[in-house]
Structure formats: C-alpha cells, structure tokens
Image (tube, rainbow, N blue to C red):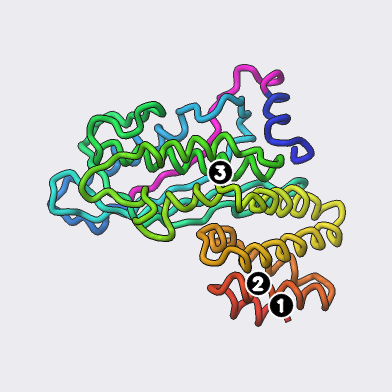
Amino acid sequence: MMLFTRVKWIVFLSFAISFANAQELNARVTVNSSRVGTAVNKNVFQTLQTALNTFLNNRKWSKDVFGPNEKIDCSFFLNLQPTEEANVYSASLTIQAARPVFNSSYLSPLINFQDEDVTFKYVEFQQLEFNENRVSGTDGLASNLTAVFAYYANMILAFDYDTFSPRGGDGYFLKAQNIVNNAPESRGITGWKAFDGKRNRYWLVENMMNSRYTIMHDIYYAYYRLGLDHMYDDEAAARAEMLNVLNLLSKFNADNQNTMINQFFYQGKANELIKIFSKAAPQEKLRASELLQKMDITNATRYKAELK
C-alpha cells in the first residue's frame, strides 16, 4: 500500500470499490465523566460519546475516497470537569493518531497531544453541527465542541497526507487554519488565539502554515515515507534517512527555538526512535542519542540509558 502516495492510492481505490464507505477516519471517542459528580444524569455523557463518534466517523472530511483499510486510526479522550454553569463543561482532550508502515502491521505514532482548553455547552440529544462557512454558529459555547473536533480531524488528515507526498496536507492545514480564524467566541473559550498560550490550537496550525517553517513538511515526509516505509527492504538506508531527519530537526530547533511544533513532533515517538536506533552502528547510535537528548528533553534520560 505504501508504495502509493495517499492521494494516488485513494484514487485507485475509488475505481476498485466505488460503493465502499468513503469516510476517512476510524475514530474512537471516549468521554470520561468521573469528575463531574453524581448530581448530573450520567446518561447524557454516553449520548455525547455516541454523538461524537458519529460526528467524526460519518462525516466526509475530504473529497477523496477511502477504502475500509485506508481509514486513519485515531482516538479522542475527552476528560470532563463541571463548571458553575448548567450544561457547560471544561475538559482536556487527548488526541492520538497513527499511520501504518509499509510491509508491516506496525502503526507509527503520528499525533499524541493533549489539549487542555476545551470548554463547551452540551444538552442531551442536541445535534452536533458544524459548518465550515459558519464555524462560530449561533451559540459560541455549543459550537466550540464541534469546532475543536473538526479542527483536529483536519489536522489528522493534514499530517497524514504530509507523510505520503510532499506538502500533501496543505489543503487540510488550510481548513484547520480557517477554523482557527473563525473560531467561536464566548466567555471561557480559549485555545484559539495567539495570546491564549504558547502550546495551543492557534500555534500548532500556525507553525505548519508559516513559510519560515516549511522544512517541517519535508521532515514529516522524510521520516515516514523515506524512512519508516523503507525499513523492510533496506533497514540501513532507512535508518540513515531518519538520522538525517534528526539532523534537520536539530538545525530547525536551533534556528526556531520554543516553537510548538518542536516538541509536538516527538510526542509518542520515544519507544519507536529507541527501537530504530538501538540497532544502529555505534557512531550512528551515538549521534542519534546526542540529538534526541537535546531535542526531546522529556525522554532524555531514556535515550541516554537505552542508546548506549
């Protein structure tokens, strides 16, 4: 499968399985209401979970046709906390997405991120609506939930497409940026503005759309398509390509310190990187360890211990 770009493969499938389910995501949404308390009817959260799964999996997010085996595996964990306002919740949202590697059953982490700024209003059985041309809707707090999920659906597609062809995800990054630019506004809503923090929805898509940081698109493509996808047929060459990616990331980090995408790239990849470079030649392993310790501070101790 991975010998095709994402677009070419999907076009091929559109002729082969014209009646296949065309949706792009194989999403699993979990709503955790353990912190909400007993005063609220917990059935509302099961209804919300079902509605969010339907919203992500039944909606058409692109113009391409995806076969059943082409859907992107992803998960969303919505951890709720109550607020003082009825039917209004504050939550963290953990988003994970994976990308299959050619000639293997392995799924490589693509996104592993926790968004701490999700505030929304939900009344049981309310319809979850989203309109790209009217993101904010008529009720900001009610619209914020679908805006957040639509944003991450597009970001998942964008990063996934970027790994299959150079700049393949541009159209979806643009859609995500449109959601940011037209995001709902209401008391308590955060995460959409530059001044809301340094690690939020605004900065993630800004980094990927910023012309100064275009090398990140090349890095994603090289890491997955030129590196991981060739581990089966030429492990040494694939590993060399991935070491080149680390060198590019090191230069990017030196030139663009404190950008969100710096740490975003590494989240969830420590085990994968350790496994890949543990089999490298001594000098290659040492170089990878030195680079990773500097760039992925959270896992620096692990790299030092396991890539000796």
Label 2 to label 1, Cα distance in Å? 10 Å
Q: What residue type is labelled 3?
A: Asp
Circles 2 and 1: CB distance less than 8 Å? yes
Which residue appears at 30% of the width and 39% of the height? 184
Helix or strand or loop: what does disc 2 sit on? helix
Question: In the rendered image, which quarter is residue 131 located in?
Answer: top left
Q: Is residue 66 left or right of residue 93?
A: right
Q: Which amino acid does label 2 sit on?
A: Leu
Q: Residue 286 carries which label?
A: none
- Residue 26 magenta-highlighted: yes
Q: Is residue 139 positioned above or below 278 on the image? A: above
The first of marks 2 and 1 along the sequence is 2
Which residue is disc 1 drawn over?
Answer: 307
The first of marks 3 and 1 along the sequence is 3
Mark 2 closeness class: few <14, some 14–19, many ≥20 residues within 10 Å: many
Q: Which mark is residue 73?
A: 3
Give the foreground label among 2 and 3.
2
Please state the extent of the stretch shown in magenta in the rendering.
14-31
Give the foreground label among 3 and 1.
1
Which residue is disc 2 drawn over?
Answer: 292
